[in-house]
Amino acid sequence: MKNFNISVLDLAPVKQGKTIHDTFQDSLSLAGYTENLDYKRFWLAEHHNMESIASSATSVLIGFIANGTKKIRVGSGGIMLPNHSSLVIAEQFGTLESLFPGRIDLGLGRAPGTDGLTAQALGRNPAIINEQFPRQILELQKYFSKENSNALVRAIPGEGLDIPMYILGSSTDSAWLAAELGLPYAFAGHFAPEQMEMAFKIYREHFEPSKYLDKPFVLACVNGIAAETSEEAHFLSTTLFQAFINIIRNDRKPFPAPIEDMDTVWSAMEKSMVLQKLKFSFIGNREEIAEQIKNFQEKYQVDELMINSHIYDHQKRLKSYEIIKQATDSLFEA
């Protein structure tokens, strides 16, 4: 089985009965805890107009997390690039890299991170997204290059800095782009599992080496909910299940506490839809998590596994990441 790194995706989840200030403090606590567990990186994702997710000002939150930690890499998973000017993102991440040298990642996606009406409010033009996104990536590369020092428009801070860029995807579209540009590729298996296998195949088979990367680098994001017992883990997972029911119902309220019986909440059709969307969710005790990760890695051979964990109780969320790290480490113990 191929060795791999393990990392954290945090959506800055807002929980029922808690404030957004609580959310940010929990995110900082999680970053420090997983840093001490030797997780590789801690990414935050851009979303908008959602009561349940507070990571809309992603660059600001990255700075807050990086300032409160010491060694873990901190970045975006991702910045939804067509929502922004390329120059502004270059300046923001140039500022972050200047403040926290060698610790900042820039993951980039093309989706709006929200609904159509909010996408309009963000100034997106859906008619040009597919040509705008690749162009903006090339613009960022130009702004970060030393060669841009003689240009009329420069990113200060940003110019000449080595800020790793990752292409994010939830379908096969971005796999082609990441391969063409020779950039690392991260797939959102935690909510869009259907095309992950094909996306990895496209990326690996069509990868073109670049000055940024000489061979394919694949990162898969999955859901992970671990506890001391299998029963407790499955109980805790009902927060995640309820959150996805709310997405199906277009209800963006904060994340709920776990419940004893999901059948009191979802219909048979909703259950089927949720379980399909959460196909790549590792749920159980340490031994079960280890077996699930082992089976996943033997099939997909990723370079990095990023864990997203929607658990209502913060202390149990911390414990989940601890158990998942123990489970992962156990796979490579002699």
Image: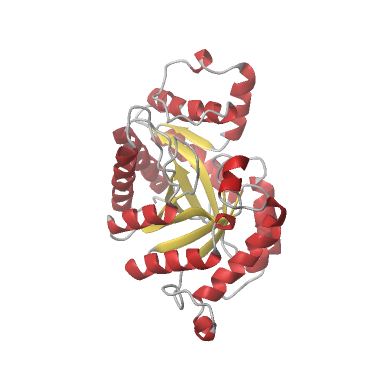
Image-quadrant location for residue 105: bottom left
Which residue corresponds to the image point at 32% horizontal and 37% vertical from the top-left?
319
Using residue 14 as the reference point, say whether residue 247 is left or right of it. right
What residue occupies the far top of the structure in this picture? 264
Which residue corresponds to the image point at 59% horizontal and 28% vertical from the top-left?
248
Is 218 situated above or below 210?
Answer: above
Residue 328, position in %: x, y? Answer: 42, 46
Q: Can residue 18 be seen in this view?
A: yes
Q: How many marks?
A: 0
Residue 78, position in %: x, y? Answer: 51, 53
What residue occupies the far bottom of the structure in this picture? 150
Between residue 83 and residue 223, name the one nearer to us.
83
Q: Give the colouring mode of the picture.
A: secondary structure
Between residue 274 and residue 151, name the one nearer to us.
151
Residue 192, position in %: x, y? Answer: 61, 41
Using residue 307 as the reference point, say whether residue 317 is left or right of it. left
Q: Is residue 207 visible?
A: no
Using residue 121 as the reference point, say whether residue 284 is left or right of it. left
Between residue 117 and residue 294, name the one nearer to us.
117
Image-quadrant location for residue 201: bottom right
Which residue corresponds to the image point at 49% horizontal and 63% vertical from the top-left?
89
Is 329 situated above or below 225?
Answer: below
Which residue corresponds to the image point at 43% horizontal and 65% vertical from the top-left?
93
Residue 299, position in %: x, y? Answer: 60, 46
Between residue 143 and residue 8, name the one nearer to us.
143
